[in-house]
Amino acid sequence: MKPTVVKGFNVSFSRGKCLLNPSNVTVEAYKPGGFKKGIVEALALSFPPSKATYFRDWNAVTIKAFNRLIGVYGSGKITFCASGNEEVEKILDWVKSVVENASAEIVDKGAPRIEDVESWSRLTPLDLYRLLPKTNCKECSEDTCMALAAKVLSGEKLLKDCKPLSKPENRKILGEFRRRLGDRALKALGWE
């Protein structure tokens, strides 16, 4: 298939590289001029750790969305598999949107530090559990705070589902969250 322009990206297609569905096409899209410095890191901090994997050496992040992996590189390259033009357009629209949000974060808060991104990517359910009130109150509809922590990190639940965190007596816990993880991480975990 010959290269074309879709949603402002230079796009090329190839067959036979999609492992989960070999009938899909592999899409390689390029944003002319690449992405703003810090976009990859900001994107990595925009999702729970199990939804985005940061690769420092490649200046890339792989995001789990739309039941597939979407690779975003600082060079402006985006890779994913799709079943057809409609899916390609939908995913590229989504990528444009998350990149615009990440750009706004950079303008507002500056580019994230690589060390913060790498620390974020190593966050485990036990690490998150240690920051929770540990009441096992079940108000979040999970049996334990540990179960909630695991689901928050997988993106299945939001941190704001922990009702005790909203109580005034637990403001100190939220302060510890901010100190250890930062506002971007709190947002990615669904506090805002």
Image: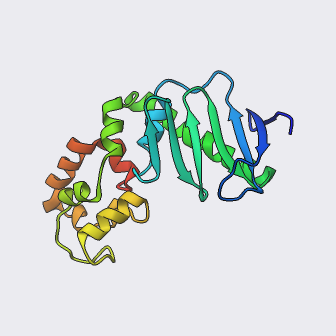
Residue 78 left/right relative to 143: right
Give the image quarter of residue 134: bottom left
- On the image, the x and y values in percent for residue 22 come to 73, 56
**Above-or-below relation of 159 to 85:** below
At x 22% / y 61%, what residue is drawn? 129
Total numbered labels: 0
Residue 134 left/right relative to 189: left
Check the picture and name the quadrant holding the N terminus.
top right
Between 33 and 61, the one lying in front of the other is: 61
At x 28% / y 76%, what residue is drawn? 139
Between 119 and 89, the one lying in front of the other is: 119
Residue 60 left/right relative to 97: left
- On the image, the x and y values in percent for residue 114 come to 36, 30
At x 39% / y 27%, what residue is drawn? 110
At x 70% / y 37%, what residue is drawn? 28
Residue at the extreme right? 2
Residue 161 left/right relative to 50: left
- On the image, the x and y values in percent for residue 109 come to 38, 31
Between 114 and 178, the one lying in front of the other is: 114
**Above-or-below relation of 178 to 106:** below
- On the image, the x and y values in percent for residue 122 come to 31, 46
Residue at the extreme top? 33
